[in-house]
Amino acid sequence: MTRRPLHRDAVAALAIWCFSLQGLCLSALLTALKYRADTLCDEDLFAACPLAATSSCATVLGDSWATVLGAPLTVHSSAFYLVTLVLALLTVCGAQTRNFTRPVLLLLAYAGFAVALVLAARAALVLGALCPYCLFLDIVQLGILVAARLMNPDGLRGAWLLLRRSPRLLAGAGVTVLALVTVASVQRTLLRRAALTTLQRDLSPCEVRLSQVPESPLTLRADSDDSAPPRLIAAVFLDLACPHCRDEFEFWPRFQATAPWPIEVRLYHFPATSCDLEALSAGAPDLSPQRSCDAARALHCMIELGDPNRAMAMTEALFAAQDRPAPHFSASHLAAVAREFGVDADPARPADQDPLFGCMVDPATTDALVRDMRFAQHVAELDRPPGALLIPLQRGQPFGRAQQVRGHKPQATLEAWISALLADLPEPP
C-alpha cells in the first residue's frame, strides 16, 4: 500500500476525534434525559407535548423510529461515536494502523450520515418538528464525513476496494461492527437495570394529596363484576392536538384490558397548548394555530348533543385530525366531524342558531373545561399534557394519596407504580 504523510491523516483524525467526542457527550445526555422521562414520575422533558410546538425534541425523540431494538436511538449513536473516537486515536499510532482505520472510518461515516439524513427527513416531512439536539448531531455527522473523506482521496469506492482486497482489513472491519454492537448492548443492559432500580425507590416525591375527583363523560368502566369494584382510577389529562396524548388515548384501553387489577379510566380535557386558564375562564376565543381549545369545546358539545355512548369514537375522530395540515381544528373540520356523529353543525350559520357552535360558546361549556383544567393544574400539579393521576380506591372511594404521572410512561413503569400504591391498601372486605 502507498505510504501517505502523517500530517494530513493526523489533522483529519483530530477533527474526527473532536466531532465524535461532542456527539458522544450529547448522545449520553439525551439517553439520560430519556431514561429519566421514562422512569421518573415528575420528569417529562421528552415524554410530553411542548407548549409551543414547531421545534420539538419531545416529538422527535418520542417517535417510534427513535427506539431501536428496545433502546433509545441515542444508545446506538453513543456506541457509534465511541467507536469512531477510538478509531481516530488509532489513526496516529502507525502506518499499518492508519491503513486499516482510514477506509473503516469512511465507511462508518457514510453509513452514519445516511441514517442522519433519513431521520432528519422524517422529522421535517413526517413529524413536522425540528429538534436542535438532533440538528447538532447531524452537523457532527457531517463533520465526521468530511474529515474521513479527507483521509481517503480515492473516496468511498477506493475504501471499499481496499477492504475487499485485504482479508485482514475486512476481518478488522467486522470486529469494528461487533464492537459497536457490543457497546450498544452493554448500554442497553445498564439502562434496563437502572430503570428497575429506580422503580423500587420511594414514591413520595411524586405523590399528591387527593382532592375531589370529578366525573367525566369520557370514562372507561372497569371490566369486572359487581363484587369486585375498581381498585384504581386512572385520571388521564389530554390535549387533542398533542401527539403524545394520542398515544396515551390509544394506550390506556389496552392497559386496562390486560391489567391484573380492575381499573377505571377517566379522561379529562387539558388543552394546555391552546388554552390559558384565566383566558378560558374569561371566555376568550381560541386563536392559537392548532385550536385544541376549540376541539375540547366541540368534543364536550358533541357528547352533550349526540350519543354519549359514542364519546370515545368522537375523541378518536378528533385525534385523527392530527394527520391533517394545521390548523387541525378549524370550524369547517369540527363541523364535519360533528355531522359524522349525527350532530347538526354548519359554520356558515350564526353561532346562536347552530347547535354545535352555540354550545361551544355557552358558558356551561367553558365551566366544564375550566373544571378539568383546574383539576389538572391545581390537583394533579401538571403544567403540560399528557399526564395522569393514579388514584387508589378503597370500597369505591379515593383513599390515601394519588401517584402523579407526568408525560407518557412505559407500561412496566406504570405497573410498578400501581403495584406499590395498591400494596399499601387493605384488601376490600
Image: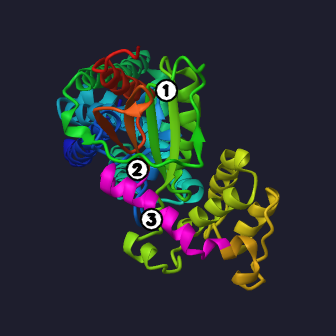
Res 222 quadrant in image: top right
Q: Which residue is mark 2?
A: 48
Marker disc for residue 356: none
Q: Position of residue 210 (x, y in %)?
A: 30, 42
Q: Is residue 383 visible?
A: no
Left or right: where 273 falls relative to 380: right
The CA span between labels 3 and 1 is 27 Å
Q: Is residue 363 magenta?
A: yes
Foreground of the two, 214 or 36: 214
Q: Quadrant of the C terminus?
A: top left
Instruction: Report the amino acid beneath label 3.
Output: Val
Residue for badge 1: 230
- Residue at (24%, 21%) from the top-left corner? 200
- Magenta: main secondary structure equals helix
Q: Mark 2: which amino acid?
A: Ala
Compare residues 388 and 5 and report the one nearer the observer: 388
Per the image, is 172 magenta?
Answer: no
Percent x, y for residue 291? 56, 70
